[in-house]
Image (tube, grey):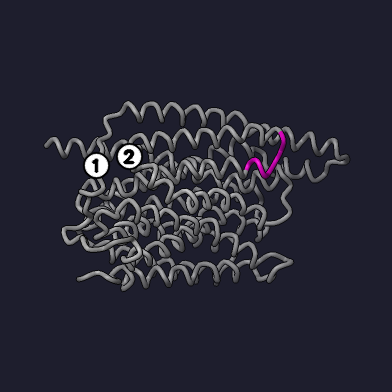
Amino acid sequence: MNARRTNTTAIFIIGFLFFIFGFITWLNGSLIQFLTLVCQLESDVQAFFVTFAFYMAYFFLAIPSSVILKRTGFKKGMALGLLVMAIGSLIFIPAAKERSFGLFLTGLFIQGMGLALLQTASNPYISIIGPIESAAQRISIMGICNKIAGISSPLILSALLLKNANKLEENINKATSLAEKEELLNALSARVINPYIVLAVVLAVLAFLLLKSPLPEPPAEEEVTTSTNAATNKKSIWEFPHLLLGALCIFLYVGVEVMAGDAIGIYGKAMGMPLDETKKFTSFTLAAMLVGYIIGIFTIPKIISQQTALKLSAILGIVFSVAVFLTSGYTAITFIALLGLANALMWPAIWPLAIDKLGKFTKTGSALLVMGIAGGAIVPLIYASLKKEDGLNMPNHWAFFICMLPCYLYILYYAIQGHKAGKKM
């Protein structure tokens, strides 16, 4: 009974942290459109450096994060991650005053550093505090916390930063002198300061509260096994093919998730939709993801296995990607939003499949998977480059389709065969 109560406490605390992850992460969709206007960015490639700076932090910090966690333990490591995120948020103050795109990207990278530490700790934690067979169910609960925050954060930020966006954009474009234009842009840029001061304070307070919380430490790494058949004769993580294939799967999954969530506004803008509408599109995708997570809680593992959930999700992703390609206007936007439904159960299914049977390598393997989050940096940039006028100059729907379909096909492969690689079944 005490173990069950301990697990419930841990799930509640980690669930709240996933809420924070979601709130910070899904601000990027609104920031892309805000910084495009404030910093007068000239192309979508430049705009997607917002996601590039944020998600590349995972690639560089995931392995160091696993080393930090070995020294600090889970709870202190998570608190440190929150403090790093607070520092990243404070960088937005001088960035806004200078209207410096480089400083904004620096703040985003530092936020990503903190999140890399938090993700490296929290994902294996939620997987190992219960049976591996139901890990996807627990991660789905975390996903609900994440996406509830994700639905609200772009709506809140766009309301604060992009209120009367169409009129603002029109006034800036019609400014008759450089001084007038600079004044309008400086006033718009200043809107970001107070929200990010509040965010920094909240993150710092949360770090203190987490240190004082009753979050239990899981068993030492040497004692952790993610399966009763965990391998004991392996010498490194490179001897687990299913993990390596899973890291690539995470890379491609996060790429399509960011495309569906953050690039949906760019896609709508390319079709001539006004900023007052496109700034809300990210929330539609996250609402669809929320529905998917709820489905996962009630179906995994009682009705379908993690592998089956991943297989069905990949098939849905393929179908919706084709539908986006074949349609236009708000119908296409609807199918992009529905990709959120297809994506919802991918992370909850890929993660436990990839870390299964890692034994003492669970933390290091988890760090490798967190590195895969860099897919959110790369795939959107490829999309923007394909459709860039001085690049390949592909039609918008072709560029989107070419980025999405191969990713979903690989995820389907991992669901059917890749997760078994190297395992003794």
Q: Residue under circle 2?
A: 74
Which residue is drawn at the image coordinates 33% and 71% (left, top)?
418
Which residue is drawn at the image coordinates 63% and 66% (left, top)?
396
Q: Is residue 414 left or right of residue 360?
A: right
Q: Position of residue 279 (x, y in %)?
A: 59, 47
Q: Residue under circle 1?
A: 218
Instruction: Assign a secondary structure to mark 1.
Output: loop
On the rendered image, what quadrant is the N terminus found in? top left
Q: Nearer the viewer, residue 410 or 164?
A: 410
Kindly report the secondary structure that dominates the magenta region of the rendered protein.
Answer: helix
In the displayed structure, 235 sits above or below 4; it is below
Q: Nearer the viewer, residue 399 or 21?
A: 21
Q: Which amino acid type corresponds to the residue marked 2 in the rendered image?
A: Phe
Write down the region rendered in magenta: 98-104
Q: Nearer the viewer, residue 104 or 218?
A: 218
Q: Position of residue 306 (x, y in %)?
A: 27, 61
Give the CA separation, mark 2 to mark 1.
8 Å
Instruction: Assign a secondary structure to mark 2.
Output: helix
On the rendered image, what quadrant is the C terminus found in? bottom left
Examine the image and state in which quarter residue 316 appears: bottom left
- Dots 2, 1 in contact, CB < 8 A: yes
Query: Which callout, 2 or 1, points at the residue further toward the start of the chain?
Result: 2
Q: Which amino acid type corresponds to the residue marked 1 in the rendered image?
A: Pro
Q: Position of residue 108 (x, y in %)?
A: 56, 43
Does the stretch in magenta take in 393?
no
Q: Nearer the viewer, residue 122 or 301?
A: 122
Q: Residue furthest right?
A: 177
